[in-house]
Amino acid sequence: MKIFANIIIIVGLALVIYSGYNIYDNHAKQNESIAQANELITKTQSDSEGDKPNSAEDMDIDQGDVIGILYIPRFDKELPIVSGTDEDELDRGVGHYTTTVLPGQGDQILLSGHRDTVFRGFGDLEMGDEFIVKMPYGEFTYVMYEDEIVDADDRTVIRSTAPDEILTLSTCYPFSFVGSAPDRYIVYAKPVEAE
């Protein structure tokens, strides 16, 4: 019986160490991605006008590239935006669904993130909260006007909104759920200005 208790303690400690390492590793990946995003935006702002992308169409983007920053004033958080929504991209920041457009293109922009990392605290969002998307070609401000909870398999939230530009943010729900959550919390925000 004592051996069994020791095994349980060792397994418990191993799980704590593994979880701690995963948290540290994700935090390090996100910090590296935000540094890359800041460098990208700073570099393009200081480039001569001929080198700076003037629009999303001017950007050469590959899966996994850091493409911008999502700033959420309510949380005073700057989050890197990474092209793609595979697990590797979501570990590094907020993922951009590549089947949707980028800011300034007049259609749906869909960003997704983990509820327990980049989108922690999303349950505290309120109508009227702002989201600022910083891209190499400009800064775009959106204001939250609607939210909803949908089934995890519901793909109807991924749709064209043209000619209206809508920023859609998605994360797992319920927020405190352990494991793979059965639903998604969706936030819709409309543009208020583009610089």
Image (spheres, rainbow, N blue to C red):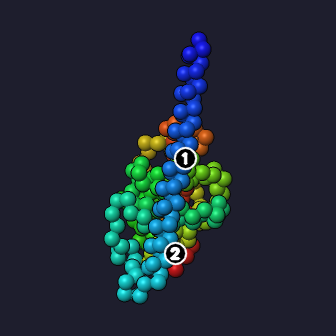
Circle 1: element type = helix
The residue under the point 50% across, 71% down is 38
Q: Position of residue 48 (x, y in %)?
A: 41, 88
Circle 2: element type = strand
* Type of amino acid under label 2: Glu
* Quadrant of the snapshot with the N terminus: top right
* Type of amino acid under label 1: Ile
Q: Which residue is mark 1?
A: 23
Q: Which residue is mark 2?
A: 139
Q: Position of residue 10 (x, y in %)?
A: 56, 27
The residue under the point 53% across, 44% down is 21
Q: Say the numbered circle drawn on residue 125.
A: none
Q: Position of residue 110 (x, y in %)?
A: 45, 59
Residue extending farthest to the top is 1
The residue under the point 54% across, 21% down is 7
Q: Residues within 10 Å of mark 1 (few under 14, many from 20)?
A: some
Observer able to see residue 170: no
Q: Position of residue 30 (x, y in %)?
A: 51, 57
| Of 37 and 156, the residue lying toward us | 37
